[in-house]
Every structure is written in structure tokens, then in C-alpha cells.
Amino acid sequence: MKYRHEWKHEINRADRLVLLSRLSAVMQRDAHTIDGAYQIRSLYFDTPGDKALREKIDGVNIREKFRIRFYNGDLSYIVLEKKSKVNGLCAKESCRLTAREAQKIADGDIGWMGADERPLCVELYSKMHTQGLRPKTIVDYTRDPFVFAPGNVRVTMDYDIRTGMFRTDFLNPETLTLPAGDSPIILEVKWDGFLPDIIKDAVRIPGRRVTAFSKYEQCRIYG
């Protein structure tokens, strides 16, 4: 599992416009965007005692969370992901799911997962049994993504964050989600071994500091 560096900054709309101009001059748009952005919908899992949420709030140094995610409403590409954080570094494991498999997991029909050939499916199955992991909330947002090959850099801006608490019909495009409070725009910068100076300069906004903002935490605002 490969760990990456990650910075997060809370920014405003004016900052986003400035960054769109700067980043467009030095980086490439992600190839999967539509008109420069894409829509992301995730279904996050947590325990009855909100282990993932509590560890995030408490700043636990080693933690993980599971989610199922798809983009732009396209149900032909759905992924199960586990995001891990250790000593401030992040890593992500993933495997593909069919729409039928994703809905089965959301509905609690998981008996088939124990013998699955995908290790991540087996791990989620095990933790749904031992820790009581269950779908907790839908997280919707729009993302402006940019990439830069040296350093394997990825810069994104996420906004219009919306929540669907205790909903499992996340594959339905008509599923109602609500604004997750007064959410900021989140600038994220991720890289491998080094962050090129040209990207450091491009993402620098006076008065903005690194934050530990979590979209999942924000989307738990109503419970």
C-alpha cells in the first residue's frame, strides 16, 4: 500500500476563481471531467458507536474508513474504497463493484462477500460482522480536479457538499440530499515523494492554512 502526502485548505469562492486560473496554466484537467468538473457520490460506513467519526474528531493517528463511490451518475464504474491515514500520510485501496453488488452491500445482503476473490470485499465483510460497520450517510459534492505528472500531484477543489443521512438508496439519482450546513470549498493537494515548487506557488493563498476538514464529518452535521 502506497502512502501519499495530503494538504487540505478551506477556501472561498473568490479563492476558487483565482486557483482555477492559476492551475489551468500549469496543470492538466483530469481526463474524466465534464466541462472541467465531475460529480461524486459516496456512501460512507461507520459503526453503531461512530468509530470512524470519533477517531477523526479526536485526531487518532492511525485510522481508516470505508466508502462506496461513483462519478457523474455513471453506475458502470463503482468502487469500494478503504482510505487509511498513518502519521499524517494517506493511502487508498479500492476494487470495482457492480451496481447490484453495491446495492446488496447497502441493503445488508452481505453473505456472498465472505468468499469473494477481492480482498477488500472480504475485509469489509469481516468488519461489518466484527465491528458492526453499516452504511451511515451519502456524501455528494462537485470536484474541480487537476493533475501534474512530476511528483504524481493531484489538486482538487470540492464544493456544494450535500448529505443524505441514513439513506441506502444512493444509486438512485432522485435520492434527496441536503446542503451539509455552511460548508466551505475544500482545496486538496496530494503528492508522492515531492511537491514541485510550481505547484506550491500556484496553490498558495494568503491567510489559508492547512486544515483537517472531513467531508464525512461535515455530512454528519444532522446526526
Image (cartoon, helix red, strand yellow):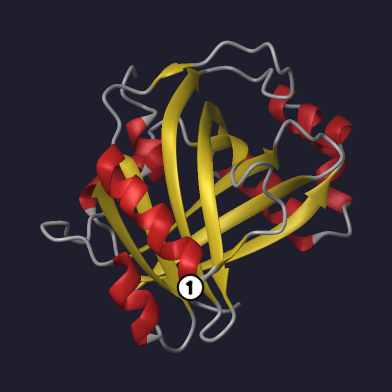
Residue corresponding to mark 1: 26
Q: Write the residue at 67% across / 23% down.
A: 170
Residue lying at the far left of the rendered structure: 207
* Residue type of the residue flagged with mark 1: Val
Q: Write the residue at 25% across / 45% down.
A: 57
Asked where in the image residue 182 lies, by quadrant, the reply is: top left
Query: Which part of the image, by quadrant, shows the C terminus?
Result: top left
Residue 200 position within the rendered picture, expressed as x and y whole percent measured from the top left: 32, 76
Residue 130 position within the rendered picture, expressed as x and y whole percent measured from the top left: 58, 45
Residue 22 position within the rendered picture, expressed as x and y whole percent measured from the top left: 39, 63
Asked where in the image residue 133 lies, by quadrant, the reply is: top right
Q: Is residue 72 visible?
A: yes
Q: Is residue 50 above or below residue 158?
A: above
Q: Is residue 49 above or below residue 84?
A: above
Residue 79 position within the rendered picture, expressed as x and y whole percent measured from the top left: 73, 48
Crowd tier of the residue under label 1, counting other residues whose Cα lies within 10 Å: few below 14, some 14–19, many 20 or above: few
Q: Is residue 17 left or right of residue 149?
A: left
Q: Is residue 104 above or below residue 144?
A: above
- Tell me how many marks there are: 1
Query: Which part of the image, by quadrant, shows the N terminus?
Result: bottom right
Q: Write the residue at 52% across / 37% down.
A: 142
Q: Is residue 64 left or right of residue 109?
A: left
